[in-house]
Image (spheres, helix red, strand yellow):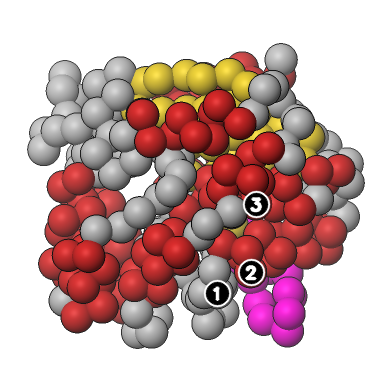
Amino acid sequence: MYLTIQNKEVYAYTGGKAFNPNLPTVILVHGAQNDHSVWAMQSRYLAHHGFSVLALDLPGHGRSAAPALSSIEKLASWLLELIELSGVQQAYVAGHSMGSLIALEAASMAPERIQKLALLGTAFPMKVSDALLFSAQHDEQSAIDMVNIFSHSSMAHKPSSPGPGFSVMNGSMRLMQRISAINPEQVFFNDFTACNTYLNGEEAAKKVHCPTLFVLARQDMMTPVKASSLLSNAINNKKIHIIENCGHSMMSEQADAVLDVLVGFMKD
């Protein structure tokens, strides 16, 4: 499904079903150097079990037109415009990593638009090391390699991969390489800088009153469990779920566990 926002074409995957704004709608927001495909399993299930789904490609990512937007605040405003243009009155919004900050900021800016909020692999402040920022700007493949290693709990997932013939780590690496190939404007550095310079997280969290779910991974090295405490302490109406044997790339490493907790939260 394509929409036009700020005179730019935007792609949203609808999970294999026609989008119907009259159904309960789940909007899925990916993280840095990713696209809608990180939500492949969750988006398809939700779309075939009573929800409409918009798994977004952020500007400059995947099939959405460039340029990538340079701040969390700009991305949150963009997200709210997308919700309005889609014809949805209120949405369930789930964001992963950088996407969690976008979802949080949007919920604080327009609370009437967000029915429930899910923050996956979140942290505030979401600081990026100088070494990783430097690599993202000057040696992008090195940054991809570092993030891919830091984002997974294991090199070889046991007792087996989530799908026969599917490599969790290699799939993640190829996606990040593809984002670099289709948009040469240093998307990784742009995304990391947006996370690194976002300062409004705690204040935004204080304005969130809708039911909020924190989905965290026990072995997450990118956004460790303890790094979410400023946000979770600022939100009263919350649940916290920690997934064991899982790193930052939770939607592929523990796809069923992520789906189960999201569905339970949205149907509660």
Residue 56 visible from this viewpoint: yes
Assign the N terminus to one quadrant of the image. Answer: bottom right
Q: Residue at x 40, y 61 (%)?
A: 196
**2 left or right, relative to 126:** right
The quadrant of the image that shows the C terminus is top right
Identify the image quadrant of residue 115. Answer: top right
Q: CA distance from mark 3 to mark 1?
A: 15 Å
**Residue at 76%, 31% in the rendered image:** 209
Can I make out residue 25 in this image?
A: no
Residue 157 in picture, x, y percent from top left: 17, 29
User: Which amino acid type is shown beneath numbered disc 2?
Assistant: Lys
The magenta stretch is 1-14
Q: Which residue is mark 1?
A: 69
Residue 147, position in %: x, y?
22, 54
Question: Which mark, residue 105?
Answer: 3
Q: Residue at x 78, y 64 (%)?
A: 81
SS class, disc 3:
helix
Counting residues from the start of the chain, the first of labels 3 and 1 encountered is 1
Locate residue 102: give its quadrant: bottom right
Counting residues from the start of the chain, the first of labels 2 and 1 encountered is 1
- Amino acid type, label 1: Leu
> Between tags 3 and 1, which lies in front?
3
- Asked if the residues shown at circle 2 and circle 1 are in contact, with their CB atoms under 8 angstroms apart, the answer is yes
Q: Earlier in the sequence, mark 3 or mark 2?
A: 2
Residue 23 location in percent, x, y? 83, 37
From the image, give the main secondary structure of the stretch colored magenta.
strand
Disc 2 versus disc 1: distance between alpha carbons?
6 Å
Q: Which residue is mark 2?
A: 74
Is 82 displayed left or right of 243 in the figure?
right
The residue positioned farthest toward the left in the image shown: 155
Occupied quadrant, residue 220: top left
Q: SS for tag 2? A: helix
